[in-house]
Image: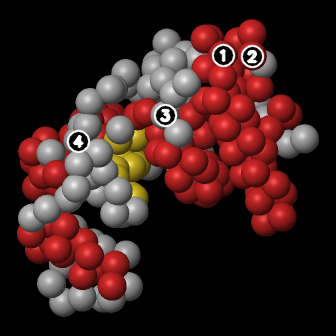
Amino acid sequence: MYLEKINSPADIKSYSLDEMKALAQEMRDALLKKLSIHGGHCGPNFAMVEATIALHRVFDSPKDKFVFDVSHQTYPHKMLTGRAYGFLDEKRYDDITGYSCPEESEHDFFTVGHTSTSVSLALGLAKARDLKGTDENIIAIIGDGSLSGGEALEGLDMAAELDGNFIIVVNDNDMSIAENHGGMYSNLKLLRDTGGKAECNLFKSMGLDYV
């Protein structure tokens, strides 16, 4: 079993592709069992398993800082940052909160239960980094549903003026609590349909690089 042996993200750095696939299945199995018994957020966390493994494989948390939006999708992140016990041991299910929690781990930076906050919060971390003169990566992970919030739009507007490195991962899975409407979602669909190559690109129009 891989999951029970993970104490920090550094433990997965040497995993092969097959080992990461096996880890992802173990994480889903643990999620399914806990959520069936204890309750919690199913869809957002099942959808983030592979993405979270990839993020921790590439970046170096907690030096590199992740801000999840909404943070109820941080269960896989918690599993890989020394908190797998809260998903494997029924007696410890209550030891782990349903959202990011700095009191739990140095890998969490905010306690956030509201949507559309990640870009603005991460911008604050990036600005603090630049003032200190350090070089860590700051990564905001935001779903397409959260992009509908005004604070997210304000964050995108300000992000283009930031001089230092700042990464926004848009988890565009065409899912949200309420159905998505409006020009932003029309453009997101166009970007999905064209593999990101559409000439009309809302992120580029706001001065951001888009990959």
At numbered mark 4, what does the secondary structure look like: helix, strand or loop? loop
Front in this rendered view, residue 25 or 16: 25
Q: Residues within 10 Å of mark 1 (few under 14, many from 20)?
A: some
Indicate left or right for 65 with 17 as reference: left
**Colouring mode (rainbow / by chain / secondary structure / one colour):** secondary structure
Q: Nearer the viewer, mark 3 or mark 4?
A: 3
Q: Quadrant where the N terminus lies?
A: top right
Who comes first in sequence, dot 3 or dot 1? 3
Disc 2 target residue: 90
Query: Hey, what amino acid is under mark 4?
Result: Ser
Instruction: Pinpoint residue 32: horizontal percent, then vertical percent.
Output: 67, 37
Who comes first in sequence, dot 2 or dot 3? 3
Query: Hey, what amino acid is under mark 1?
Result: Tyr
Q: Is residue 84 above or below residue 16?
A: above
What distance separates the C-alpha of mark 1 from that of mark 2?
A: 5 Å
Disc 3 target residue: 41
Disc 4 target residue: 116
Disc 1 target residue: 93
Instruction: Pinpoint residue 72: horizontal percent, then vertical percent.
Output: 43, 33
Q: Is residue 103 above or below residue 159?
A: above
Which residue occupies 72% across, 51% down? 24
